[in-house]
Image (cartoon, rainbow, N blue to C red):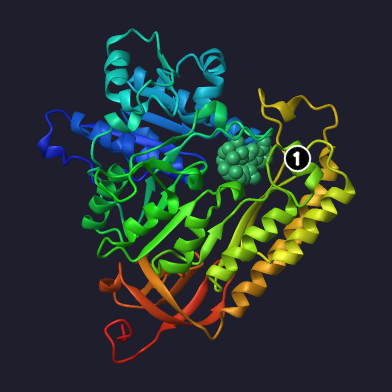
């Protein structure tokens, strides 16, 4: 769960009537990106960030529907917000409450039934109309504004250029939606069909982010390596670019030190992407490549369209192209019909590949997806036991990977002050959080850091002092 970064909105003195906006973001990085764009849309109307929902004129919950727990959190949060809204009304004021994102898309009617005080309900493909929806809600006597349509033209055509300061590490959505229809997943229903932004739009947005101070860009998409955006006019070959070509073009932006992308599907790892890992030094040697299961039987039932062995071959090719590549993955435990043997195949795959980090979840039946109706659901205690065993193995691998970094010099992109005075925190190429003593002026620099110790949630190191600018003492 993230609080949306809405800093950098239009300064209060430039707008006639200042109002306040609070966005609470649940779920994935794509929601973080969407929340920042909603703030961009509202800034010209005078909406500046509020520190909390208590003070806000407009409260937006940007929601996630991927697992049941994520969706239920929204309804419990709405209970608290209802009290704030009523309190504001008693004081003669008005607070607009909006539910955006995938829960709004999937459960819009349920929100209207369970939380009729919500003023706006809109899906992830409709938020470009936010200013208009807010105006309608303010004009209405509380009838509610409801928009879960999928527009004929993608919303990106209507979004304003971002005015918010992106920070050192920025997200950039290049692809949205999904046509894969894995049997457990709500994304094709909540985000809609796969769409790739034209490469020239992505490059222009990346240039703006870099000009505003970003040194790392993470390209986002529900299935980001399915990217096939229109190639820029006049580019050789014409037609469409895959993600590998897009990454090569972005690597040409001076000052962009690092490129990452997430989340990928194994089926869409193509030769162009593997070659980009080989050739593009700015592309970080860390890849989140969800496998979900190590059992071919389960993978087929999930409609993942690859076997465990195919996944291993893809990893082999990637590692050949970029030998220092570290991997992360997603696992679903207790998919309907998963047997002990299927689960052992998952453990075997983990042991064979070796992950630097990973996310693992109990299967959560999602209404409207094919797997939710299966009659061979795995009992909760079995899921819990298997998840614990998998997580123990994954944690062991993560600890070993981190321990292996001790004594190594890693380039760290410093992002912000650390917890202790005189300290900065940044990220290694492998997304590990690293802290070291450094002057605040080094935020935004990529600096060689020798790793001294592994701490529970980060690595501790010291800047390597060399004669070069990169290695100067802090
Ligand atoms: N497109 C990516 C892929 O193909 O693997 C995954 C994107 S999905 C939004 C993020 C992760 O949520 C998935 O990799 C999966 O592990 C998890 N997930 C999706 N549906 C789930 C469900 N019904 N129960 C548990 N986890 C789920
Ligand atoms: Fe969901 Fe990813 Fe499968 Fe698409 S490819 S349906 S986003 S898990």
Crowd band around label 1 with a 10 angstrom C-alpha radius: few (<14), some (14–19), many (20+): some
When the figure is inspected, residue 130 is found, relative to residue 267, above or below; the finding is: above
Image coordinates of residue 242 in percent, x first then y, are 43, 48
Q: Quadrant of ligand 1?
A: top right
Give the left or right position of residue 128, taking residue 84 as reference.
left
Please state which of residues 346 and 320 is positioned toward the viewer in this rendering.
320
Query: Does mark 1 have its CB less than 8 Å from ligand 2?
Result: no
Residue at the limit of the structure toward the right, as seen here = 340
When the figure is inspected, residue 398 is found, relative to residue 291, above or below; the finding is: below
Q: Residue at x 67, y 29 (%)?
A: 366
Residue at the limit of the structure toward the front, as seen here = 237
- Give the mark count: 1
Quarter that holds the C terminus: bottom left
Give the left or right position of residue 15, taking residue 110 as reference.
left
Image coordinates of residue 16 in percent, x first then y, are 11, 29
Residue 52 is at least partly visible in this image = no
Give the left or right position of residue 88, taking residue 161 as reference.
right
Q: Residue at x 50, y 23 (%)?
A: 105
Give the left or right position of residue 404, taking residue 377 as reference.
left
Q: Quadrant of residue 280?
A: bottom left
Residue linked to disc 1: 300
Q: Residue at x 11, y 38 (%)?
A: 13
When the figure is inspected, residue 215 is found, relative to residue 341, above or below; the finding is: below
Please state which of residues 433 and 75 is positioned toward the viewer in this rendering.
433
Image coordinates of residue 402 in percent, x first then y, are 60, 73
Q: Residue at x 35, y 46 (%)?
A: 5
Residue 467 is at least partly visible in this image = yes
Residue at the limit of the structure toward the bottom, as seen here = 467
SS label for mark 1: helix
């Amino acid at each position: 769960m993230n609080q949306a970064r809405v800093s950098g909105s239009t300064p209060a003195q430039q707008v006639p009537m200042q109002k306040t906006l609070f966005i609470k973001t649940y779920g994935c990085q794509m929601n973080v990106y969407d929340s920042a764009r909603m703030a961009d849309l509202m800034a010209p109307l005078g909406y500046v960030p509020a520190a909390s929902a208590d003070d806000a004129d407009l409260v937006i919950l940007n929601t996630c529907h991927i697992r049941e727990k994520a969706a239920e959190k929204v309804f419990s949060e709405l209970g608290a917000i209802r009290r704030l809204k009523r309190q504001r009304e008693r004081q003669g004021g008005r607070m607009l409450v909006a539910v955006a994102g995938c829960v709004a898309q999937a459960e819009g009617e349920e929100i209207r039934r369970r939380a009729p005080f919500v003023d706006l309900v809109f899906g992830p493909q409709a938020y470009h109309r936010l200013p208009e929806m807010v105006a309608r809600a303010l004009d209405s006597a509380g009838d509610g504004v409801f928009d879960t349509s999928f527009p004929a033209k993608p919303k990106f055509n209507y979004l304003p250029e971002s005015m918010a300061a992106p920070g050192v590490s920025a997200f950039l959505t290049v692809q949205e939606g999904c046509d894969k229809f894995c049997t457990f997943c709500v994304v094709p229903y909540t985000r809609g069909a796969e769409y790739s932004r034209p490469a020239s739009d992505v490059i222009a947005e990346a240039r703006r982010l870099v000009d505003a101070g970003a040194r790392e860009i993470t390209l986002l998409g529900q299935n980001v390596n399915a990217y096939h955006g229109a190639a820029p006019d006049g580019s050789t070959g014409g037609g469409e670019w895959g993600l590998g070509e897009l990454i090569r073009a972005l690597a040409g932006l001076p000052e962009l030190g690092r490129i990452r992308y997430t989340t990928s599907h194994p089926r869409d790892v193509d030769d162009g992407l593997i070659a980009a890992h080989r050739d593009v030094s700015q592309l970080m040697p860390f890849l989140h490549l969800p496998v979900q299961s190590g059992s071919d039987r389960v993978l087929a039932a999930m409609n993942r369209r690859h076997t465990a062995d195919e996944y291993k071959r893809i990893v082999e090719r990637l590692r050949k192209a970029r030998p220092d590549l570290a991997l992360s993955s997603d696992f679903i435990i207790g998919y309907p019909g998963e047997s002990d043997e299927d689960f052992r195949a998952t453990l075997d795959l983990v042991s064979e590949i070796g992950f630097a980090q990973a996310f693992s979840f109990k299967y959560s039946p999602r209404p409207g997806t094919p797997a939710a109706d299966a009659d061979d659901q795995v009992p909760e205690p079995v899921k819990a036991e298997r998840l614990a065993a998998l997580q123990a193995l994954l944690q062991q691998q993560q600890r070993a990977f981190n321990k292996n970094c001790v004594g190594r010099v890693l380039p760290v992109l410093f992002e912000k002050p650390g917890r202790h005075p005189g300290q900065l925190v940044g990220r290694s190429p492998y997304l590990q959080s690293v802290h070291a003593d450094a002057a605040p002026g080094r935020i935004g620099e990529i600096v060689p850091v020798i790793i001294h110790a592994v701490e529970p949630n980060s690595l501790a190191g010291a800047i390597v002092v060399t004669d070069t600018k990169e290695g100067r003492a802090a």
